[in-house]
Image: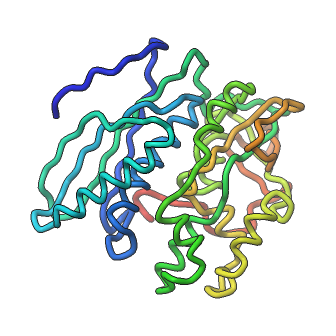
Amino acid sequence: MIGAVLAAPDGRVVVSLDVLVENRHFRRDWSSAADVGWRAAMQNLADIAAMGARPTSLVVGLVLPADLPARWVTGLARGMAAACAPSGVAIVGGDLSAGDEVVVAVTVHGDLEGRSPVLRSGAHPGDVLALAGAQGRSVAGMALLQAGHPRAHLDLVDSYRRPRPILAAGPAAADAGATAMLDVSDGLLRDAGRLALASGVVLDLIDPAEAFRADLAVLDGAARLLGVDPLEWVLAGGEDHGLLATFPGGADLPESFRVIGHVHAATGPEVAGRVLVHGAAAPVTARGWDHFRG
């Protein structure tokens, strides 16, 4: 890689890295090269937004099989460019090597623009828990592909191939006084648990039938087709990359956020890091994506 020189007017740079491995995170028979490029870029852009920053640039590392057509690589680049263009993000460098399967490693940089970073460790008892973005759509799309229904419920399949997080919601949340934030990449329950553990609190989601009414309605047809409870997709599904944040009670939330729960002190039997659903244990067995177990 040839070095890139980047401006940092704020004096601080937010950096994040994600890796996509073929047949672990994507399949070439499920997604076009442009789809893979879009996902690789967008999941990184969401990481920066979740710190309250504006993404500015990417560097990309590729591992490519020797027989991979060049048009696949150019398609990957087009997908990345399409994901980055609305945010004015530039791809400023990268590197490549040969290997048995495609690996896409993306490092993203962001500018806080004078804001304090929003960490996952700042939630306080009395805060509200809010979400910006859809929930459950990506995992539903993947389930349809796994079941051999690539043309059913195309909106959900497209959500898997090309997630669309509300990137502007991150800086807006920071400006509105968000106390903690992260993006939902590995499942709502799993990522909410990470926020709760880092903050030393307990999170209690309000009744999902109320908090996720619109999501459940969108998922209903695919759930009936596959014989799945859509609540499992909502609570355990990831890779929609919605932004999960806490705000002081009574705060005016940015327009893109909806309240989905509350923050409580970790006292008595309620240990820090626990996530309740309507005051009780979560009514699903799945907890989200595990990078080593699947």
Q: Is residue 272 left or right of residue 100?
A: right
Q: Quadrant of the C terminus?
A: bottom left
117 up-or-down from 85: above or below: above
Kindly indicate the quadrant of the structure image that contains residue 273. Answer: top right
254 up-or-down from 243: above or below: above
Kindly indicate the quadrant of the structure image that contains residue 179. Answer: top right
Q: How is the image coloured?
A: rainbow
**Residue 282 x %, y %:** 74, 62
Q: Is residue 249 left or right of residue 154?
A: right
Residue at 23%, 58% in the rendered image: 73
Q: Is residue 74 left or right of residue 194?
A: left
261 up-or-down from 292: above or below: above
203 up-or-down from 63: above or below: above
The number of discs equals 0
Q: Is residue 143 left or right of residue 25?
A: right
**Residue 221 x %, y %:** 69, 81
Residue at 81%, 62% in the rendered image: 208
Q: Quadrant of the N terminus?
A: top left
Q: Nearer the viewer, residue 132 or 77?
A: 77
Residue at 37%, 65% in the rendered image: 26
Residue at 72%, 50% in the rendered image: 275
**Residue 107 x %, y %:** 35, 38
**Residue 286 x %, y %:** 61, 67
